[in-house]
Amino acid sequence: GENVEQHPSTLSVQEGDSAVIKCTYSDSASNYFPWYKQELGKRPQLIIDIRSNVGEKKDQRIAVTLNKTAKHFSLHITETQPEDSAVYFCAASNANSGYSTLTFGKGTMLLVSP
Amino acid sequence: EAGVVQSPRYKIIEKKQPVAFWCNPISGHNTLYWYLQNLGQGPELLIRYENEEAVDDSQLPKDRFSAERLKGVDSTLKIQPAELGDSAVYLCASSFKFPYNEQFFGPGTRLTVL
């Protein structure tokens, strides 16, 4: 089955700095890579996703890059704000399987200090 | 649009007692997932339903866990008997089946086994 590794486990930045979270996956058939944000005590929520037919996707201050050859993808947050503080999870799945399952990484706790 | 609803939000029981969790998915979502989330970890799939059919229950500890999704809408996850190690957050999620399925999570049920 799929295995997703996520680094770092914690990341502390100053407000306004950039933050980068990296994930690797093992199954070359995986083609859908979402990122979820989970604030303390709340449900995970999708913030951005990327499909294997593109190498980069941006949405305002967040972007995701994908390297299929190396089987890794990254989340980039620019101009971080205190409200970005949360746990971020990457995930991977083979969306073509019809009954796809997401395999999640262990999460990165991002702390943005004012 | 109403989100995924779960109840109860919190449950405290003594070991060896039974416990049940309920989930109502987003209307129209035919795929329903139950996840286990331990503290500081990413969600781990327990079981996935496509309508009323359990299509992936390979990670469900069947000696003590059971689930059902009658009529392909609401779902119930049961543990009997509960063990200390079952203390965790149980997340329900739902999605459309195809093709790149954003999963919408419920608020979760935090189970504490004493």
Image (cartoon, rainbow, N blue to C red):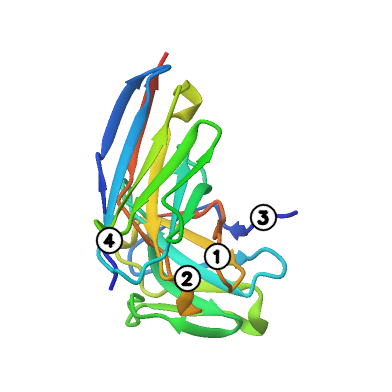
Residue found 47% across the figure and 83% down from its top: B55
For the residues labelled 3 and 2, the Cα–Cα distance comes to: 23 Å
Residue found 54% across the figure and 65% down from its top: B100
**Chain identity of mark 3:** B
Mark 2 or mark 4, which is nearer to you? 2
Please state which amino acid type lies under the numbered disc 4.
Gly
Please state which amino acid type lies under the numbered disc 3.
Gly
Q: Which residue is mark 3?
A: B3
Residue found 44% across the figure and 74% down from its top: B47
Q: Is residue A22 left or right of residue B69?
A: left
Tell me whether the residue at label 1 lies in contact with that at label 2, contact meaning CB atoms closer than 8 angstroms. Answer: yes
Q: Same chain, marks 1 and 2?
A: no
Q: Horizontal and vertical percent for residue B16?
A: 34, 69
**Residue B4, above or below A95:** above
Q: Which residue is mark 4?
A: B85
Mark nearer the N terminus (1 vs 4): 4
Task: Pick the residue in front: B26 or B15.
Answer: B26
Mark nearer the N terminus (3 vs 1): 3
Please tell me in which quadrant of the rendered image residue A12 appears: top left
Structural crowding at the residue carrying mark 3, measured as other residues with C-alpha within 10 Å and reported as few (<14), some (14–19) or many (≥20): some
Q: Same chain, marks 4 and 3?
A: yes
For the residues labelled 1 and 2, the Cα–Cα distance comes to: 7 Å
Please tell me in which quadrant of the rendered image residue B52 appears: bottom right
For the residues labelled 2 and 4, the Cα–Cα distance comes to: 32 Å
Q: Is residue B112 visible?
A: no
Q: Which residue is mark 2?
A: A95
For the residues labelled 1 and 4, the Cα–Cα distance comes to: 31 Å
Tell me whether the residue at label 1 lies in contact with that at label 4, contact meaning CB atoms closer than 8 angstroms. Answer: no
